[in-house]
Image: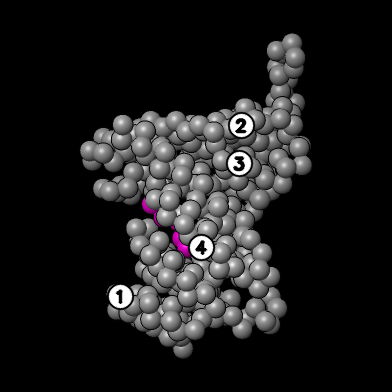
Amino acid sequence: MSSDLKTMKIGVIGTGNWGGNLVRNLAALEVLAGVADPVEENRAKSLEDAPGIEAFEDAGALISAGYDAVGIATPAATHFAIAKQALEAGLDVFVEKPMTLDPQEARDLHILALANDRILMVGHLQLYQPAITFVADYLKAGKLGEVYTMHQRRSKLGRVRDKENVMWSFGVHDVAVLLSLAGEAPTRVIASGHAALTPGVEDDTYLHLEFSNGMKAHLHNSWLWPRVERELIVAGERGILVFDELKSKVVLHHKTVDAGLIHHDEGTEGLFEGSGQPLRLELEHFLDCCRNRTQPRSDGRNGYEVVQVLQAAESQLRS
C-alpha cells in the first residue's frame, strides 16, 4: 500500500457485531481515525481494538469531524439517512449490505454520489471472495462457452429473524454475485417461499431470475435446513463449474451434452482453491477506489439493482 493511502482518515459508524470487523480491518490498514456508536460498550471495544482513535456517540458528529470517508454498519433501515448525510458532506462512503431497504432510496444515493463525484461502495462481500473473482474471469473469458443456468444455495439451521425474511438475511450476497456474473439486471423476477415460524417472515425461499440473453439463475435460502450448504453451480456449453464455498474450491466437471443429446463425461478438474480474506480485500478495494477515483466493483448501481431484485421478490411473497 502506498504512503498516500495511509494518510486517509476513515470513520466507522456502527461498531457492533459486523462493524467491529470493519474497525479492526481499517485499523490494521492504518486508516481508521474514529468511530461513532450510541452504545458505550461498543465504543469502548473499538478504543480497545484501535487505541488513539476518536469516539463519538452521534453519527453526525463523526461526519463533521473532517475525515475523508466513512464506513456504515448500522441497521439497514438507517443506511439511507446516514449515507445521504455523509455524501452531502463530501465524504466517500462504504455502506454495508443491503444498501437500503427501498430501491428508490438506493437509486437516490447512487445518483447523489455521481452528482457529488463521491465514491459509493456497497459491502457485497462475496464479490471479493477470490474464488468468485476467478469464476467471473473464467466466464468472461468464454471458457465455459454459453452459460445456461446458475444455481446458488445458502442454507443451514441458522439464526432465525422475526422481521426480515431469510432472503434478505442470507441472500443479499448471493443476488449480488448472480447479477455480477450475469453482467446485467434481470428482466424477470419470480419468488416463492414459506413462513413456518413467524407469519409474513419466510424461513425458506426460492428466487428465480431471467436475463435478456436467455440465461436463468436460481437461489435457495433457508434457515430451517439440516445441512450447511454454500454452493454455486454454473452450467454451460463446455461443462459445469462448481464452487464449494465451505471448501473454498472451484471444480470444473467436464460433463457436456452434444447436438445429438448424447452425454459426455470426461471427469473433473480442480481449477482454483483458496479463500483469502474477502473483507480485507474488499476494504483495500474501497481505499484504492477512493485514492484513484475509480468506480468500485460493488458500486451504487450494483447496490441499487440488488435491492430492486429483493424488493420485487418481497412484493411477490407478500401477494
Identify the magenta region.
95-101
Which sits earlier in the primary sequence, circle 4 or circle 1? 1
**Would you say 36 lies left or right of 248 here?**
left
What crowding class fits label 1: few (fewer than 14 Cα within 10 Å), some (14-19), or many (20 or more)?
A: some
On the image, numbered disc 4 is attached to which residue? 112
- Look at the magenta stretch and give its main secondary structure: loop
In which quadrant is the N terminus drawn? bottom right
**Would you say 44 lies left or right of 124 here?**
left
In this picture, is 180 found above or below 48? above
Q: Which numbered disc, 2 or 1, marks the residue closer to the eye?
A: 2
Q: Which numbered disc, 4 or 1, marks the residue closer to the eye?
A: 4
| Residue 291 in picture, x, y percent from top left | 65, 73
On the image, numbered disc 3 is attached to which residue? 184
Given the image, on which type of amino acid does mark 3 rest?
A: Glu
Instruction: Identify which residue is drawn at 55% across, 31% down.
Output: 210
Marks 3 and 2: CB-CB under 8 Å?
yes
Q: In this rendered view, identify the residue nearer to me: 56 or 39.
A: 56
Marks 4 and 1: CB-CB under 8 Å?
no
Given the image, on which type of amino acid does mark 2 rest?
A: Ser
In this picture, is 18 found above or below 314? below
Given the image, on which type of amino acid does mark 4 rest?
A: Leu
Is residue 44 in view? Answer: yes
On the image, numbered disc 1 is attached to which residue? 38
Distance from Cα at disc 4 to Cα at disc 1: 27 Å
Instruction: Identify which residue is drawn at 52% across, 38% down.
Output: 152
